[in-house]
């Protein structure tokens, strides 16, 4: 996870997504990698929307503050977090 250049209150987050999972869950491994499983299928952007909703909920942000910066059609994505610094994002994700 890296802080966006020039602004400490925004961050980017690299994640790996598993669509069509048996349940929605978010795991941060020992190396700090974020893996998200969602029940939504990858069709019509449903899995992308589910990822943003899950992250917003876990981070305590409005859904409008979480967006996919790159990787719309990939399992590996870069997420943009508006109004939350990288260190605080890591702390919140690791706490749950």
Image (tube, rainbow, N blue to C red):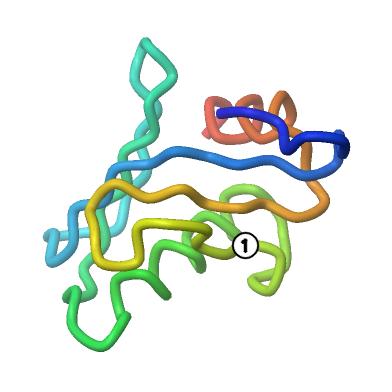
Q: Quadrant of residue 10?
A: top right
Q: Tell me which residue sits at (69%, 74%) in the image.
A: 64
Secondary element at image label 1: strand
Decide: is 75 above or below 28.
below
What is the x, y in percent for residue 67? 57, 64
What is the x, y in percent for residue 4? 73, 38
Q: Quadrant of residue 74?
A: bottom left
Q: In the visual, does 67 lie left or right of 30?
A: right
Q: In the visual, does 14 lie left or right of 45?
A: right
Q: In the visual, does 8 lie left or right of 26?
A: right
Q: Nearer the viewer, residue 96 or 65?
A: 65
Q: Tell me which residue sits at (21%, 68%) in the image.
A: 39
Q: Nearer the viewer, residue 17 or 60?
A: 17
The outermost residue toward the top is: 30
Q: In the visual, does 10 lie left or right of 7?
A: left
Badge 1 is on which residue?
66
Decide: is 81 above or below 8.
below
Q: Tell me which residue sits at (36%, 11%) in the image.
A: 30
Q: Tell me which residue sits at (37%, 70%) in the image.
A: 48
> Crowdedness of circle 1 by 10 Å Cα count: few (<14), some, many (20+)?
many
């Amino acid at each position: 996870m890296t802080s966006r250049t020039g602004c400490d209150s925004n961050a980017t987050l690299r994640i790996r997504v598993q669509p069509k999972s048996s349940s929605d869950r978010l795991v941060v491994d020992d190396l700090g990698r974020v893996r998200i499983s969602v029940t939504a299928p990858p069709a019509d952007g449903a899995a992308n929307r589910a990822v943003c909703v899950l992250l917003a909920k876990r981070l305590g942000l409005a859904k409008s503050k979480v967006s996919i910066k790159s990787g719309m059609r990939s399992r590996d994505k870069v997420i943009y977090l508006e109004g939350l610094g990288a260190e605080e994002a890591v702390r919140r994700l690791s706490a749950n």
